[in-house]
Image (tube, grey):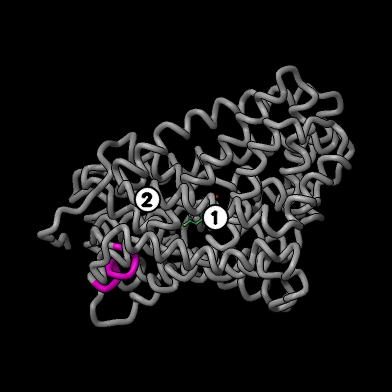
Amino acid sequence: MKQESHVKREGFSSSIGVIAAVLGSAVGLGNIWKFPYVTGANGGAAFILVYLLCLALVGLPVMLSEHLIGRATKSNAVTAFKKLEPRRPWFLVGGAGVVSAFLIMAFYTTVSGWVYAYIFKSASGALLTTKPQETTQVFNSLVSGVGEPLFWQVFVLIVIGIIIMAGVTKGIERATKFLMPMLFILLIIIDIRSLTLPGASAGLSFLFKPDFSKITVSAVLAALGLAFFKLSVGMGAMITYGSYVDDRENLPKMAIKVALSDTLVSLMAGVAIFPAVFAFGFKPDAGPKLLFIIIPTVFNSMPLGRIFMVLFFLLTAFAATGAMLSLLEVPIAYLTEEYQWSRRRATLLTIIGIGLLGSTATLSNSLLSHVLLFGKTFFDFFDFATSNVLLPLGGIFIALFVGWQWNFANVKREMTNEGQLANEGLFNVYMFLVRFIVPIAIIIVLLTGLNFIHV
Ligand code: PFF
């Protein structure tokens, strides 16, 4: 079901560019900030195994589903469903995705702001210490301020606004193609340092030696939520990016490559952080501040640490920026295509909306710390509600749509590039996963996990 449109739609211009952009969406604060602290809070290696299972059996099939829907319709997340099934309200799944994008951006821009601030703090020498108490203090004074974290959040919004206005090819693709390899190289350098710290082995066994008694119902929900958040799936970001992908691209292969590389980056971030956690006598369950208090201690215990630390936060900022571009592109593609808004107008208004909502997340460590929604601060609520509820729910519907609603032959045609790719076996496995495993697994985990947590 290919629809011709009279206005030429932008798209990614090369295979490398596609991989870079899709990987640029997946790789972000999720790998460097969230993966380590969620793993730390849920007991380490056993949690990682559950996470990998969620990734392979649930996250990956949903990612492929989104790419198929996007490329087949060449449309934003809402219009895509309308084109494939005009008679039923599946487009609401895309609509929920637009809402999720806003909610994720609300807290993602807060943390990105902290990262941007850390670039300057590490350059100025404010973080030149190997003492955990001192790095904790620098972090606390940043996040419990009002003007400073808000300033950085606005700064972040302006940066991504400028890139998004430049467009898909010249903005998103060009930025991510350069950033991904750089991040990888820098992670290798800090992994080497972290691994050679005295006492590094305790961190490695925490990461790689599973202790299954640590697996609780809420840990399984956290693993599932992390898989969705990590791969940027369940909310239409991958439908939107899929819509910019060329018809000759091998979609299953691309999804597998992206999931593998993304996991590698998360594990490398884990190796950068956990040996140091144990070597410097921290607790792995420090929560969202883990990255910000551990990483400075690693760099300060190595030669040229200050320069490397600036580079590290710079690249983390880049990774976060690449991910935010895809988050922002979800509402932008919708507003420009559905309402014919100019890209400029859509970007400006979306950014203002995110800024207003996001300031509540930023201030939840200071002025708004006493305001609780379902027992959580704004920041924690946006995080929990998206990763652990909205994205898995979106995932169920996306899988059900491809598995049961979209015409079987058309799904196959899209996945095999009109029969040119021979991946019959893979198609059958994929269909089995989206029809049965994905919806059932998510429902079980959501019902037990949410009930257990008493949201
Ligand atoms: N995958 C990104 C990360 O791990 O940081 C976060 C993200 C980006 C989630 C884009 C959702 C999304 F649409």
> Would you say residue 84 is visible in this rendering?
no
Q: Under 8 Å from ligand 1: the CB of mark 1?
A: no
Q: Earlier in the sequence, mark 2 or mark 1?
A: 1
Estimate how packed mark 2 is, as few (under 14), some (14 to 19) or many (20 or more) residues with alpha carbons within 10 Å: many
Instruction: Write down the residue under mark 1.
Output: 154
Q: Would you say the magenta stretch is mainly helix, strand or loop? A: helix
Task: Say how many tags the image has.
Answer: 2
Name the residue rendered at 50%, 54% in the picture.
157
Q: Under 8 Å from ligand 1: the CB of mark 2?
A: no
> Would you say residue 426 is visible in this rendering?
yes
Task: Reply above or below: 99 against 309.
Answer: below
Name the residue rendered at 28%, 64% in the picture.
336
Contact, mark 2 vs mark 1 (Cβ under 8 Å): no
**Horizontal and vertical percent for residue 294?**
77, 39
Q: Please, what is the three-letter code of the amino acid marked with disc 1?
A: Val
- Could you tell me how far apart the alpha carbons at marks 2 and 1 are, in whole angstroms? 15 Å
Quadrant in the rendering for residue 350: bottom left
**Horizontal and vertical percent for residue 171?**
35, 43
Q: Is residue 96 left or right of residue 14?
A: right
Disc on res. 164? 2
Estimate how packed mark 1 is, as few (under 14), some (14 to 19) or many (20 or more) residues with alpha carbons within 10 Å: many
Residue at disc 1, secondary structure: helix
Find the magenta span and give its range: 76-82
Disc on res. 62? none
Q: Quadrant of the C terminus?
A: bottom right
